[in-house]
Image (cartoon, rainbow, N blue to C red):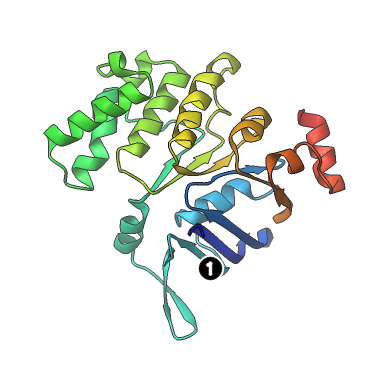
Amino acid sequence: MTTAMVRAENVHKSFGHVEVLKGIDLEVANGEVFCLLGPSGSGKSTFLRCINHLETIDAGRLSVDGELIGYREEGDKLYELRESEVAAQRRDIGMVFQRFNLFPHMTALENVMEAPVQVRRESRTDARDRALQLLDRVGLGERAGNYPAQLSGGQQQRVAIARALAMKPKLMLFDEPTSALDPELVGEVLDVMKDLAREGMTMIVVTHEIGFAREVADTVVFMDDGVVVEAGKPADIIGNPQHARTKAFLSKVL
C-alpha cells in the first residue's frame, strides 16, 4: 500500500469575503504525478501555495509525509508554527513558480548552490558539485557561468527547477511552470519534468498543458470555483469527462 505524501482534509481558504477554497479533500501518493487543471481563479494555485504554507488555511488540515504543515495540534486545536519551524518544513518541499525568481546578480551555478549552502549548511565544494550535476541533468551544464539575463526564459526555468532539486526535496510543486514562456520554449521545461516523473519524484503540477497531463499524470483533478469537480486517471478525466463543467472547459482548451 502506497503512503500518502500529501493529504488535504476539508481545506478552506478565503481572501477577505471571497472564499477561494471550499473544502478540498485530496490525497497524493508517494511517487505520484498529480496534475491540477481548471480555469483561472478556480483555486488551483492557492491550494498549491497552502501545501507549503505560503498561504495559511482557514479550516481543515494539510499534511506532507504524515506531518501537519504550518500547525501543531494540541488536543483538538491547531496552533500556527513559528516561521522558523515552517521554514524547516519547506526545506523538503521544492516549488517552481510561473516566474523564475532567479537572483539576477548570481550565475546559474551560484543560484543553484545558494540554498544548500545557506539553509542546509552544506560545504561550498559539495554544493558546487551537486549544482553542476543538476545543471547537467536539466541540460544546462555548459551554461553554469551564465547570468539569468544571458539565458532564455526556458533556460531560466530549468535553472529554477535545478535550484529546487538542490534542496533534495521529497515533494515538488509546480505552479504553471510554462505559462510565462514563449510557446517554442515550453517543451524543454516539460521534458525536464517528464524525466523527474520517470525517476519517481512526487509532483503536484498546476498546468494548462493538457498534453503533458494526459501523458505524464497518474491522477488528474479538475477544479472550478474552489471545489474538486472531478478526479481520476487522465484517460477518464481528459478523455471521457463526466461533469458538464469539465466537458465545457476541455472543449475550449483541446
Q: Residue furthest bottom?
A: 75
In percent of width and height, residue 249 lies at 79, 38
128 with respect to 67 (left or right): left
41 with respect to 80 (left or right): right
| Residue drawn at 35 percent across, 38 percent down | 165
The relative height of residue 142 versus residue 233 in the rendered view (above or below) is above
Asked if residue 16 shows in the view, the reply is no
| Residue drawn at 45 percent across, 86 percent down | 75
Q: Residue furthest right?
A: 244
Q: Judging from the image, what secondary structure is the residue with disc 1 in?
A: strand
Q: Nearer the viewer, residue 33 or 145?
A: 33
Q: How many marks?
A: 1
For the residue carrying disc 1, how many other residues have a C-alpha within 10 Å: few (<14), some (14-19), or many (20+)? many
The relative height of residue 43 versus residue 18 in the rendered view (above or below) is above
Q: Quadrant location of residue 136?
A: top left
Q: Nearer the viewer, residue 217 or 95?
A: 217
| Residue drawn at 19 percent across, 29 percent down | 129
230 with respect to 112 (left or right): right
Q: Amino acid at mark 1?
A: Arg
In percent of width and height, residue 203 lies at 50, 43
In percent of width and height, residue 125 lies at 12, 32
Q: Quadrant location of residue 216?
A: top right
**Residue hosting label 1:** 61
Q: Quadrant of the C terminus?
A: top right
In percent of width and height, residue 132 lies at 24, 25
| Residue drawn at 23 percent across, 33 percent down | 113
Q: Residue furthest front?
A: 1
Q: Quadrant location of residue 213?
A: top right
